[in-house]
Image (tube, rainbow, N blue to C red):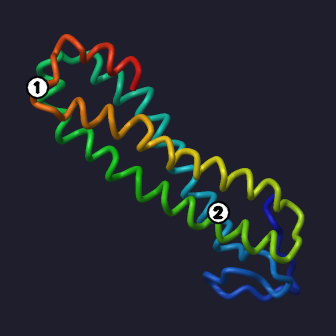
């Protein structure tokens, strides 16, 4: 549940919490936007970028991936970290002040932390393998299917 701001509450632009101790509207909006941007980037990657990579000749993909792979991560990772930080801040404020919706914020934070943990568990190893100049072109299709 997203906290609402009533006319009698004074919120400074960018405030982290309102007078009642609830997360400030600017923080809620920024957290929601960062989380949505990360989700959209993930969907775009899986529905557009990875299928385009799969359509490439394996040797052409392996030549392109050292630029395209890290660039994808360099765009999405800061958005993901921003989402985690803002959601964490909102969750902290909501729990500290016993606000309604704190379980939802905690679940959102935990879910985004899970995506951060997923990176080293799978993607770092897969990306490192495909960045290896000795990675066999005949293994590209299987790796991208799992990626």
Q: What residue is shown at x 12% (from left), y 22% (from top)?
A: 60
Classify mark 2: helix, strand or loop: helix
Q: Is residue 82 shown above or below 5?
A: above
Q: CA distance from mark 1 to mark 2?
A: 41 Å
Q: Is residue 24 shown above or below 50?
A: below
86 left or right, relative to 72: right
Look at discs 1 and 2 and give the one toward the viewer. 1
Q: Is residue 77 shown above or below 68?
A: below
Which residue is label 2 attached to? 87
Quarter of the rendering occupied by the N terminus: bottom right
Q: What residue is shown at x 58% (from left), y 58% (from top)?
A: 33
Q: Quadrant of residue 17?
A: bottom right
x then y, percent, for residue 128: 25, 37
Identify the residue at the far top of this view.
Answer: 138
Q: Nearer the viewer, residue 14 or 143?
A: 143
4 left or right, relative to 87: right
Mark 1 crowdedness (10 Å alpha carbons): few <14, some 14-19, many ≥20: few
Quarter of the rendering occupied by the C terminus: top left
110 left or right, relative to 93: left
Classify mark 1: helix, strand or loop: loop
Number of numbered tags placed on the structure image = 2
Q: What residue is shown at x 79% (from left), y 54% (from top)?
A: 104
Which residue is label 1 attached to? 134
x then y, percent, for residue 83: 55, 59
Query: Which label's residue is closer to the chain start, 1 or 2?
Result: 2
Q: Which mark is residue 144?
A: none
x then y, percent, for residue 3: 82, 67
x then y, percent, for residue 46: 44, 29
């Amino acid at each position: 549940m997203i906290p609402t701001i009533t006319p009698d509450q004074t919120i400074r632009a960018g405030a982290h919490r309102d007078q009642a101790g609830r997360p400030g509207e600017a923080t809620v909006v920024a957290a929601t936007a960062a989380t949505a941007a990360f989700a959209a980037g993930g969907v775009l990657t899986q529905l557009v970028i990875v299928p385009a990579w799969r359509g490439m000749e394996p040797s052409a993909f392996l030549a392109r991936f050292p630029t395209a792979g890290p660039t994808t991560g360099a765009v999405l990772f800061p958005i993901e970290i921003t989402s985690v930080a803002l959601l964490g801040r909102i969750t902290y404020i909501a729990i500290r002040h016993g606000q309604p919706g704190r379980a939802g914020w905690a679940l959102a934070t935990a879910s985004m932390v899970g995506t951060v943990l997923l990176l080293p568990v799978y993607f770092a190893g897969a990306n490192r393998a495909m960045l290896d100049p000795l990675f066999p072109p005949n293994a590209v299709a299987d790796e991208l299917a799992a990626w």
